[in-house]
Image (cartoon, rainbow, N blue to C red):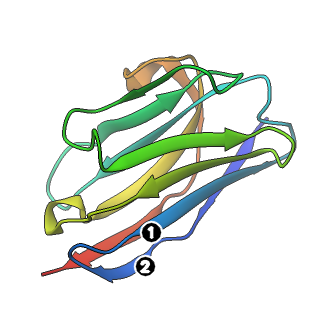
Amino acid sequence: QVQLVESGGGVVQAGGSLRLSCTASGRTLVGWSMGWFRQAPGKEREFVATITRGGVGTIHAPSVQGRFTISRDNAKDTVYLQMNSLIPEDTAVYYCAAGAYSANQGAYNYWGQGTQVTVSS
């Protein structure tokens, strides 16, 4: 069993930056591809970014391409989501997930509880 914990969320003004972190207890993240997803109020959860086990391959959703960057530090057993140039539409609960290298939520086996990101205009 992998228990994922997200941190780094908060309230930020439009144009600002935040960095989310995802760590695990119980098992290491090194053997998993990792993903970030988000769910805005009244909307379905959507894909944000994914990264391969080694950290070489990444995919970002078109809506965040060029503003967000997923990365990982396997020595620290941590996955990051650097979010720059935030806009109000980025307001959501952000979840990290462990599983396959995919934009499909069904490819992920484990999910964190989420961290709230609020972007004010």
Residue 41 position (above or below residue 66): below
Q: Is residue 22 above or below residue 69?
A: below
- Report the side of 116 relative to 67 (left or right): right
- Image marks 1 and 2: residues in contact by CB distance under 8 Å: yes
64 horizontally vs 9: left or right: left
Q: Nearer the viewer, residue 87 or 3?
A: 87
Kindly identify which residue carries mark 1.
18
Residue at 59%, 41% in the rendered image: 71
Front residue of 80/85: it is 85
Against 100, is 91 above or below? Answer: below
Residue 104 % position (x, y): 37, 20
Measuring 72% from the left and 52% from the top, which residue is drawn there? 23
Q: Residue at x 47, y 55 (%)?
A: 82
At label 1, the amino acid type is Leu
Indicate the position of residue 49 as horizontal and vertical percent values: 41, 35
Q: Residue 57's x, y, as percent?
A: 54, 19
Tell me the amino acid under the disc marked 2.
Gly
Q: Nearer the viewer, residue 71 or 43?
A: 71
Residue beneath the point at 21% across and 33% down:
62
Residue designated by label 2? 10
Q: CA distance from mark 1 to mark 2?
A: 8 Å
